[in-house]
Image: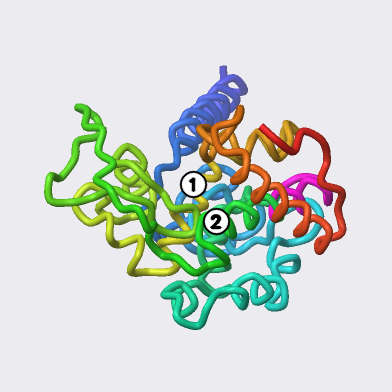
């Protein structure tokens, strides 16, 4: 009995630790905290460093080098310098804002060297097309873009037209993006056009939820077009598809990677 007691106590302690860990792994951290590799919330290197899942992570992306080493000043400026000096985006979008937003999405640009480079090329191809080389913060043809539901209502005094690098649109995108990032997507969608880091974070939010997997799984650039604006596919807007593919192949060349297959949707 004397030897069984300590063993039983150890087993019970381990069981409790295991139970606690399972609960903790449902992170749901506050926006200023990191979710560690083990599923705990905090702000030190143990939480925000290597293996950080989400939040303001400080570890570099995995795979073929960090995204920041690919998106150099020269790469970013080569795009934005093609915008007219009169463009609002010229004074809004910056590489620094891109990198600040990137810290919250450490899985962007993960995988082999080729996959990382293709994802970076794909992201900037779509951003270039959507914003006219970072010229536009808001879309030109503004509309309400409200599809109200119990889960995603609309504020009748607001419009949910495209804003930011990927021109996030519709109330059912603004509301969950705001909840994830920390702004009021229902009542203040204009926040996306007022803060460059928030703008890039909405682009990453949409990308990681809708586009990242098709790139990582090797479905090709065409699948990313369908994920972003499927109405262009199957003859819906062949000129737009051609433009997106052109930017993508150009950036792949700059980053030293083949564009892969299935370029059109």
The first of marks 2 and 1 along the sequence is 1
Task: Tell which of 182 and 158 is nearer to you.
Answer: 158
Q: Is residue 207 left or right of residue 161?
A: right
Find residue 252 and name its label.
none
x, y (%) of residue 120? 69, 55
Q: Residue at x 41, y 65 (%)?
A: 137
Find the magenta span and give its range: 110-120
Quarter of the N terminus within the rendering: top right
Disc 2 secondary structure class: helix
Q: Which residue is mark 2?
A: 47
Vertical comparison of 20 with 163: above or below: above
Disc 1 secondary structure class: loop
Quarter of the C terminus within the rendering: top right
**In the rendered image, is residue 46 in sight?**
no
**In the rendered image, is residue 164 in sight?**
yes
x, y (%) of residue 76? 65, 72
Look at the image and say whether residue 45 sits in the magenta stretch.
no
Dots 2 and 1: beta carbons under 8 Å?
yes
Q: Which residue is mark 1?
A: 40
Q: Is residue 120 left or right of residue 171?
A: right
Task: Tell which of 22 and 190 is nearer to you.
Answer: 190
x, y (%) of residue 38? 57, 43
Residue farthest to the left, as pictured: 156
Q: Main secondary structure of the magenta part?
A: helix
x, y (%) of residue 172? 32, 37
Vertical comparison of 97 with 117: above or below: below
């Amino acid at each position: 009995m004397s030897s069984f007691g300590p063993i039983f106590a150890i087993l019970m302690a381990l069981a409790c630790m295991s139970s606690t860990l399972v609960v903790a792994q449902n992170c749901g951290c506050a926006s200023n905290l990191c979710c560690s590799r083990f599923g705990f919330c905090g702000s030190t290197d143990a939480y925000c460093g290597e293996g950080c899942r989400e939040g303001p992570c400080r570890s570099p992306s995995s795979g073929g080098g960090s995204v920041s080493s690919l998106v150099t000043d020269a790469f970013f400026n080569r795009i934005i310098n093609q915008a007219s000096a009169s463009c609002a985006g010229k004074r809004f979008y910056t590489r620094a804002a891109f990198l600040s937003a990137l810290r919250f999405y450490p899985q962007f640009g993960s995988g082999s060297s080729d996959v990382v480079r293709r994802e970076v090329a794909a992201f900037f191809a779509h951003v270039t097309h959507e914003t006219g080389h970072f010229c536009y913060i808001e879309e030109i043809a503004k509309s309400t873009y409200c599809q109200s539901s119990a889960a995603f209502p609309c504020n009748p005094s607001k419009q949910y037209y495209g804003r930011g690098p990927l021109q996030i649109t519709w109330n059912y995108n603004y509301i969950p993006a705001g909840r994830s990032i920390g702004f009021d997507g229902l009542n203040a969608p204009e926040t996306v056009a007022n803060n460059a880091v928030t703008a890039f974070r909405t682009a990453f939010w949409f990308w990681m939820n809708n586009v990242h997997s098709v790139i990582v799984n090797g479905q090709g650039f065409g699948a990313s077009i369908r994920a972003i604006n499927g109405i262009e596919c199957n003859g819906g807007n062949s000129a737009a598809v051609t433009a997106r593919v052109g930017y993508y192949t150009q950036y792949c060349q700059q980053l030293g990677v083949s564009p892969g297959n299935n370029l059109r949707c």
